[in-house]
Amino acid sequence: MTREQLEHVLRAAAAIACENSLVVVGSQAILLPFPDAPASLRVSREVDLYPALHPERADLIDGAIGALSSFDETFGYHADGVGPETAVMPADWMTRASLHYIGDVTAICPEVHDLAVSKCVAMRDKDADFVRTLLRERMIDASTLVSRIDMLDAARQPVSAIVAWARRRAAEAGTP
């Protein structure tokens, strides 16, 4: 995905949801602070997002411009309407989030370490690749990542296992 494609999805999602503030939580959020992110971070065809004030309208977005929609078939990329619970990040992540303006649309983007935390929690192969690249490219710092993981609610998340997973990715990236 390119920054221009991301902006296209954001404008379309805002129009569908009748809301100009969107929270972008998936991997393609990386294109907001890093428009020229390495190609290996831009492989996803979808933008995970939800309306900031009315998260319940994510279903409208998903139905109109989601996977297998005519939007997806026409452009080759789409939105995934998700909810605030989709990406697990530290409870205070919003205090570090950045705002990005695309015309009248405001995209709220997690700070890159918080975004990486959500990938560590998910622990999928594609998330390992994403985190390794962030580390290898020095877009995140391993110790900051671990400190953010430590901020997760240990009653809900296996924090020590997530930390161990993140440390393995740092070692694989050559940045312990």
Image (cartoon, rainbow, N blue to C red):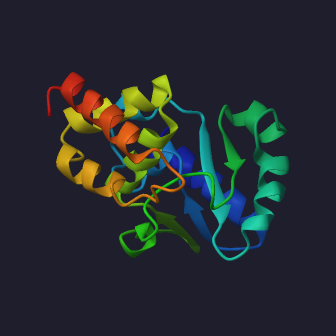
The quarter of the picture where the C terminus appears is top left
The residue depicted at 81 percent of the width and 32 percent of the height is: 68
- Counting the numbered discs, the total is 0
Comparing 176 with 57, the one in front is 176
Comparing 9 with 81, the one in front is 81
Can residue 51 be spotted in the picture? yes
| Above or below for 109 versus 169 | below
Can residue 112 be spotted in the picture? no
The percent position of residue 30, horizontal first and vertical second, equals 41, 48
The percent position of residue 123, horizontal first and vertical second, equals 47, 32
Farthest residue, direction front: 155
Farthest residue, direction left: 175
The residue depicted at 46 percent of the width and 44 percent of the height is: 158
The percent position of residue 174, horizontal first and vertical second, equals 14, 26
The residue depicted at 45 percent of the width and 55 percent of the height is: 154
Give the side of residue 68 with respect to residue 113, left or right: right
Comparing 76 with 94, the one in front is 94
The residue depicted at 35 percent of the width and 70 percent of the height is: 96
| Above or below for 144 versus 43 | below
